[in-house]
């Protein structure tokens, strides 16, 4: 076989592979998945470096308090979302993009103000981490951060609903500036970390509104017809999503209160490292929901997404499991104590990914009641087992609760999917 023939063969295969890649990027499922993946990778990657630098500049106890405050803001944002992040994607092709987006932004922003004030006045007193925001100036900044985070989140979901995930990626690029702000704000201690987050949410929100206003006419009016049509779907997903997100977000203040500030920091860093594994599965699941909402073939896309998730998940799990200790040591020698928890979180990834793959399937099929039931089971198991195991085993107890919860949930999901014919 001649050398020229071999060279020609290699060139032909390279051209075909490049052509296949180009064709895949034309496919909305893979194009949107690619930008969602890049956006999530950027957000998680920058978040990784953010906490890496914070762990070097700030004391472990200060990091623990800051994680509890940031988790509280995120939880308030989810409470104020009212499920519009799901109904925007599901109904934008039905009710019209202007009506859907303006209504969603107005209601969620108003709700964020109300829930944020309620938290400051009443709920914050239950957590030790909230002592900082009893100061009037810090409290006002906390409220502003809640509102900015809410608008940032809902505009990001707007970009997804418009199938413009490139702008979602750019939105997260602006948010990356939070790393730089850690240095000048170090004198504020815990609030320096929180302040870096708050300021960049403001910048990213201004950018997002500017970009979105060029795509859609923002008149900030509430469309009652859209509310009526989407109420059941929105409210169902609101309850479901709140049940899904709240256990992880409640953990930092719970751990801080039960076993200490350092353990809260260890928990958050272990979750941050393990979240690197979940970027691709979450991006593919989100893209599956978007494409399914536009009428694309569900079963075909589920199989394609499932294969892609496995291909990405296996090497990611192996890498983090075997080199997780080196990664944690970069944050500081104290954080290596989180390695046993990290190992359990990593091994749980296959069970977590399977559950997350069924969320868009049930949303596309409008089986929201089933989704609520599944996430209610997850909520009860995860919080209940975490409380019991943390008291008995310390921080690693959360890992036991996380793994056991998702193993049980996988069995329930597979049984129900076969019984109900979800796919």
Image (tube, rainbow, N blue to C red):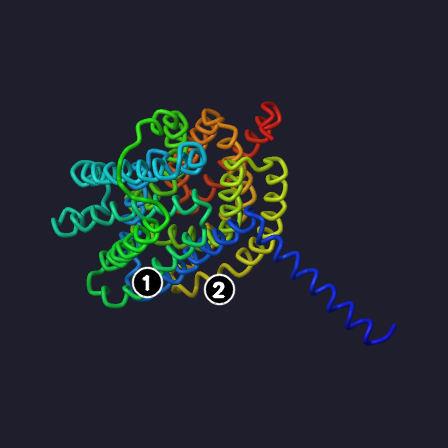
Indicate the quadrant containing the N terminus: top left, top right, bottom left or bottom right: bottom right
Question: Is 118 positioned to the left or the right of 268 in the image?
Answer: left
Indicate the quadrant containing the C terminus: top left, top right, bottom left or bottom right: top right
Which of the two residues, 3 or 306, is positioned nearer the viewer here? Answer: 3
**Residue 414 percent across, percent down from the top left:** 59, 31
Q: Tell me where residue 273 sits by quadrant.
A: bottom left
Mark 1 → mark 2, Cα distance in angstroms: 26 Å
Secondary structure under tag 2 reads helix
| Tag 2 residue | 326
Determine whether 123 is above or below 46 in the image.
above
Residue under the point 61% across and 48% down = 308
Disc 2 crowd, CA 10 A, few/some/many (<14, 14-19, 20+)? few
Looking at marks 1 and 2 on the same chain, the residue that comes earlier in the sequence is marked by: 1
Secondary structure under tag 1 reads loop
Q: Residue furthest right?
A: 1
Residue under the point 40% across and 60% down = 46
Question: Is 292 positioned to the left or the right of 337 in the image?
Answer: right
Which of the two residues, 120 or 369, is positioned nearer the viewer here? Answer: 369
Determine whether 193 is above or below 76 in the image.
below
**Residue 61 percent across, percent down from the top left:** 28, 56
| Tag 1 residue | 177
Q: Are marks 1 and 2 in contact (CB under 8 Å)?
A: no
Residue under the point 27% across and 64% down = 181
Q: Tell me where residue 199 sits by quadrant.
A: bottom left
Disc 1 crowd, CA 10 A, few/some/many (<14, 14-19, 20+)? some
Numbered tag placed on residue 342 in the rendering: none
């Amino acid at each position: 076989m001649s050398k020229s023939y071999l060279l020609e063969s290699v060139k032909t295969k390279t051209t075909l592979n490049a052509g296949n890649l180009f064709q895949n990027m034309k496919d909305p499922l893979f194009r949107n998945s690619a930008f969602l993946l890049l956006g999530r990778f950027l957000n998680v990657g920058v978040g990784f470096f953010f906490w890496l630098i914070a762990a070097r500049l700030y004391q472990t106890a200060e990091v623990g308090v800051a994680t509890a405050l940031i988790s509280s803001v995120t939880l308030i944002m989810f409470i104020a979302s009212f499920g519009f992040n799901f109904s925007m994607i599901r109904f934008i092709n039905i009710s019209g993009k202007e009506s859907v987006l303006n209504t969603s932004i107005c209601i969620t922003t108003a709700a964020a103000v109300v829930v944020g004030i309620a938290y400051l006045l009443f709920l914050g007193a239950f957590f030790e981490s909230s002592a900082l925001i009893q100061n009037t100036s810090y409290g006002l900044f906390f409220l502003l951060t809640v509102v900015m985070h809410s608008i940032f989140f809902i505009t990001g979901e707007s970009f997804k609903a418009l199938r413009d995930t490139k702008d979602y990626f750019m939105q997260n690029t602006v948010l990356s500036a939070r790393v730089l702000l850690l240095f000048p704000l170090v004198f504020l201690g815990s609030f320096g970390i929180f302040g870096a987050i708050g300021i960049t949410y403001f910048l990213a929100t201004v950018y997002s509104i500017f970009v979105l206003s060029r795509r859609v006419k923002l008149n900030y009016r509430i469309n009652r017809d859209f509310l009526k049509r989407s109420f059941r779907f929105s409210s169902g997903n609101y309850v479901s999503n709140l049940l899904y997100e709240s256990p992880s977000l409640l953990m930092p203040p719970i751990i801080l209160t039960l076993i200490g500030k350092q353990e809260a920091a260890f928990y958050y860093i272990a979750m941050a490292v393990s979240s690197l594994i979940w970027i691709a599965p979450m991006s593919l699941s989100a893209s599956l929901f978007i494409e399914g909402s536009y009428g694309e073939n569900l079963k075909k896309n589920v199989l394609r997404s499932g294969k892609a998730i496995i291909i990405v998940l296996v090497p990611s799990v192996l890498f983090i499991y075997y080199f997780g200790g080196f990664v944690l040591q970069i944050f500081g020698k104290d954080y290596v104590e989180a390695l046993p928890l990290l190992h359990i979180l990593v091994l749980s990834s296959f069970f977590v990914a399977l559950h997350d793959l069924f969320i868009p399937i049930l949303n596309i099929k409008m089986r929201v009641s089933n989704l609520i039931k599944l996430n209610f089971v997850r909520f009860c198991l995860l919080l209940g087992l975490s409380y019991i195991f943390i008291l008995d085993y310390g921080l690693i107890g959360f890992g036991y609760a996380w793994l056991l919860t998702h193993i049980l949930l996988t069995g329930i999901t597979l049984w129900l999917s076969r019984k109900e014919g979800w796919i």
